[in-house]
Amino acid sequence: MDALGAIDGWGADHAAAAVVRPGREVERHGDDGHEFRWASITKLLTAYALLVALEEGIVDLDDEAGPPGSTIRHLAAHASGLPFESGGAPIARPGQRRIYSNPGYEALAEAVGAAAGMPFEDYLRAAVCEPLALGGELQGSPAAGYVGPLADGVAFADELLRPSLVAPETLAEATSVHFPGLGGVLPGFGRWDPNDWGLGFELKDAKQPHWTGSRNSPRTFGHFGGSGTFLWVDPELDAALVCLTDREFDAWALEAWPGLSDAVVAELSPP
């Protein structure tokens, strides 16, 4: 796919990208052997471990977790009221605002691990990483600490296209809006009202401009990371795009990411 070659001009020391279609049909470009820091794409792995835990019956979305009045659902959907970074008290009541929160995901992982009777990183490995044959590992925070190669992103994207670890209905619920109507900031891209979010998955819906580009359908879901990484799945295209770099997110990405996404969608779309 010609579009993927654009990553060579992004100024990253290492960059790799892949277009994924069902059955791990893949077109790749770049340094796919490098171990990349996924940054906040990690939240999707943590959220997926939550979905497995829900199906196993060890947690429920309405279980209390996090600050007073918050539940697992609030934490997963960035609606618990916890701030962006650790070290602060809640800055809103649960369900009042969409506040993108790293400590919220650390609290979510702690709740899942406690319910499973093991450290969260062990549960993530057993529930998600080993079944998908992911070669990387969680190194630090369940909000941003996964490190792994492009092949891991391809395997995870393929799972999101055709789920095998959870029922399709479970993934559909996770990629639908939870706490509809909440406004909030999409980090690096500005405030949206509403700022729609699923259970870990950021939803494009009517947001425009958006990091996935103008050609992606409103049903597109995914996440991006501060290390210059992103993963999106567009159900209408029945395809996903995984992009991993080691160039920290900044103004460069505001143009580069949507440009790549638009070019990929254009090549995938029928004439």
Image (tube, grey):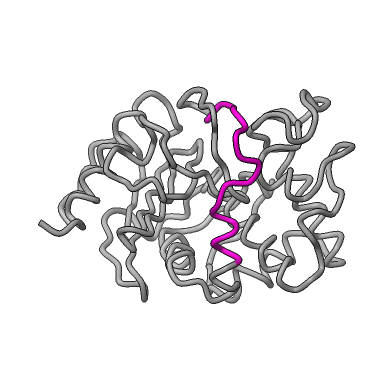
Which of 33 and 228 lies nearest the eye of the viewer? 228
Q: Position of residue 271 (x, y in %)?
A: 10, 56
Give the residue displayed 57% in from the left and 68% down from the top: 169
Residue 131 colored magenta? no
Count of marks placed on residues: 0
Depicted 198 relative to depicted 116: above or below: above
Which of 8 and 153 lies nearest the eye of the viewer? 153
Depicted 212 relative to depicted 129: above or below: above
Q: Position of residue 214 (x, y in %)?
A: 29, 38
Depicted 47 relative to depicted 83: above or below: below
Q: Would you say 246 lies left or right of 37 here? A: left
Give the residue displayed 35% in from the left and 29% down from the top: 254
Q: Would you say 1 lies left or right of 248 here? A: left
State the residue lying farthest toward the left.
Answer: 271
Q: Position of residue 107 (x, y in %)?
A: 79, 45
Q: Which residues are magenta?
A: 170-186
Which of 178 and 230 lies nearest the eye of the viewer? 178
Give the residue displayed 76% in from the left and 59% down from the top: 120
State the residue lying farthest toward the right.
Answer: 68
Quadrant of the frame with the N terminus: bottom left
